[in-house]
Image (cartoon, grey):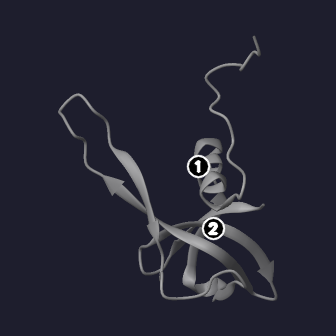
Amino acid sequence: MNIRVLKLVTGEELVAEVTMNNGSYTVKNPLRIMMVPPKSANDGISIGLAPFAPYVDWEKGANIASEKVVFIMDAAKDLAAQYASIFSPLVLPNKSGLIVPR
């Protein structure tokens, strides 16, 4: 899975599976990245992921012209892991520790 972050000329930021094709990007299963305000004064800003154009079948992918993309970068490890967990058919264990049989 090639999980990338794209910023579009519209200002939207997406995380998606991305491949390059003849001057355009093929995007599959995009999610819009949104800033979430802190719940209290001690909390930092968080991000949320929301469906991007949920009325479209993204499984086959869609092309976005490269001139409509401001930048494209690899997703941060935590973001890529969260994205993969959303679209993976597998349920992965939490990293907090090992499960040891008795």
Q: Of all residues shown, which one is farthest toward the right?
A: 22
**Residue at the image point whose x is 37% and y is 45% from the top:** 46
Q: Secondary structure at mark 1?
A: helix
Q: Which residue carries the number 2 mark?
A: 16
State how many labels appear.
2
**Earlier-in-chain disc, 2 versus 1:** 2
* Residue 38, disc: none
**Residue at the image point whose x is 44% and y is 73% from the top:** 12
Q: Secondary structure at mark 2?
A: strand
Q: Are the residues tagged 2 and 1 within 8 Å (C-beta)?
A: no
Image quarter (top left, top right, bottom left or bottom right) of the N terminus = bottom right
Residue 48 is situated, as x and y percent measured from the top left of the image, at 41, 55
The amino acid sitting under disc 1 is Gln
Query: Local crowd at mark 1 within 10 Å, few (<14), some, or many (≥20)?
Result: few
Q: Of all residues shown, which one is farthest toward the left?
A: 41
The amino acid sitting under disc 2 is Ala
Query: Local crowd at mark 2 within 10 Å, few (<14), some, or many (≥20)?
Result: many
Where 41 sits versus 55, above or below?
Answer: above
Image quarter (top left, top right, bottom left or bottom right) of the C terminus = top right
Q: Give the foreground label among 2 and 1.
A: 1
Q: Does 80 sit left or right of 102 as displayed?
A: left
Which corner quadrant of the image does residue 69 belong to? bottom right
Residue 40 is situated, as x and y percent measured from the top left of the image, at 18, 34
Cα gap from disc 2 to disc 1, whole angstroms: 11 Å
**Residue at the image point whose x is 72% and y is 52% from the top:** 90
Q: Nearer the viewer, residue 101 or 17?
A: 101
Residue 91 is situated, as x and y percent measured from the top left of the image, at 67, 47
Residue 88 is situated, as x and y percent measured from the top left of the image, at 70, 58
Where 45 sits versus 59, above or below?
Answer: above
Q: Which residue carries the number 1 mark?
A: 82
Q: Of all residues shown, which one is farthest toward the top?
A: 102
**Residue at the image point whose x is 72% and y is 71% from the top:** 18
